[in-house]
Image (cartoon, rainbow, N blue to C red):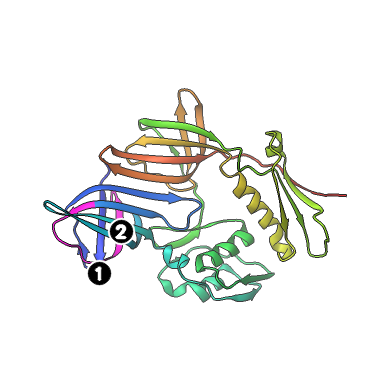
Amino acid sequence: MADVIISLFDLEEKEIEIDELISYELCSDLDAACDALKISFLYKKALPEIYRVEASVNGKRVFFGYADTQRENECSNGFVCFIYARSSACLLTDIEAKPFTYYSPSAASIWKRNAEDLGFEYKLGDIYCEDEYQISKGTSVFGAIQGFVLYAAGESIRITPQNCVEIMKSNNSVEIKGDILELKRVINRANALSKITYKLNSDKDYIYTRESEFIKSRKITSGVMKNLSSVEDWQRDRVLESIMLSANSEYYTYEITVAGFECVELMDEIKVKSRMFGLIKGFAFSIMHIMDENGERTRLKIRVSFDLEERTNVVE
């Protein structure tokens, strides 16, 4: 069993000691800005209102966030309590960014205007462009920064448990050696995308196509139509790439449940030796750590990387 320590803090920042932890579920997902933590535990009296939640494993902080939901059910010897918390990234997803048009912006300038005073450490580096970037009304602070970094650098961002904003990437390679409780392969053809047909500013019709030769080779012919007339020229390739990558991101995946607490992070390269599938290699895009009456286990979703072989054509 991993040494999991969960700390709760009330509105006065006083730490609340948990009497007995019944279960926990810690989830991270590449497609979600916030990590999530669910815990159930026993407490001898009514809880004060919980404000902040932290979790560490073997001395390393793995979660820092804020309580969204608190429930207490009376039982014979006190209360069975439940807390659901989101990681500190929720401060960026729940606050609207200031609508503004930037000229030759940098990620640092957008951060400074919208998020500098929220208590995070900026570690995105020097990311900038020489064109225009517009933040529309209703865009969250996270969405504003993520959108710019995606289009200017082709990268996603991540808020770490140490409250740092960083590029979402990893150079770690992890070989899973624990007991495999469940392993399954999923080929999702339903959502795969073969072609994007689109038009630009002066076009009257949709005369351009962006195709994936790889997806076409799988005998998948699905397509969508996009009007990119409002998209800046410098953003267009990023938009098309993002649409294609997002649609095909779960075309070929593995889902693995392994006994114990596996110390892996999003984007880590994962290697698993399977008796039937052979060597499985991909990167972690979803991680769930679970402890309940069935023991402690880690559930991983792994995306297998492949070249989409994209090309752009003009329809005559």
Check the image and name the residue furthest to the top.
Answer: 276
- Give, as a single range, the part of the protein colored magenta: 41-60
- x, y (%) of residue 98? 54, 76
Which element type, helix, strand or loop, lies under badge 2? strand
Residue lying farthest to the left in this orientation: 77
Q: Quadrant of residue 118?
A: bottom left
Point out residue 156 in the picture as x, y percentages from the top left corner. Answer: 55, 56
Asked if residue 155 lies in the magenta stretch, the reply is: no
The quarter of the picture where residue 135 lies is: bottom right
Q: What's the residue type where badge 1 is placed?
A: Glu
Labelled disc at residue 54: 2
Residue occupying image coordinates x 39% and y 36% = 257
* Residue 143 seen in render: yes
Q: Along the horizontal axis of the image, is 223 left or right of 65?
A: right
Q: Which mark is residue 13?
A: 1
Magenta: main secondary structure equals strand
Q: Quadrant of residue 204?
A: bottom right
Q: Nearer the viewer, residue 276 or 174?
A: 276
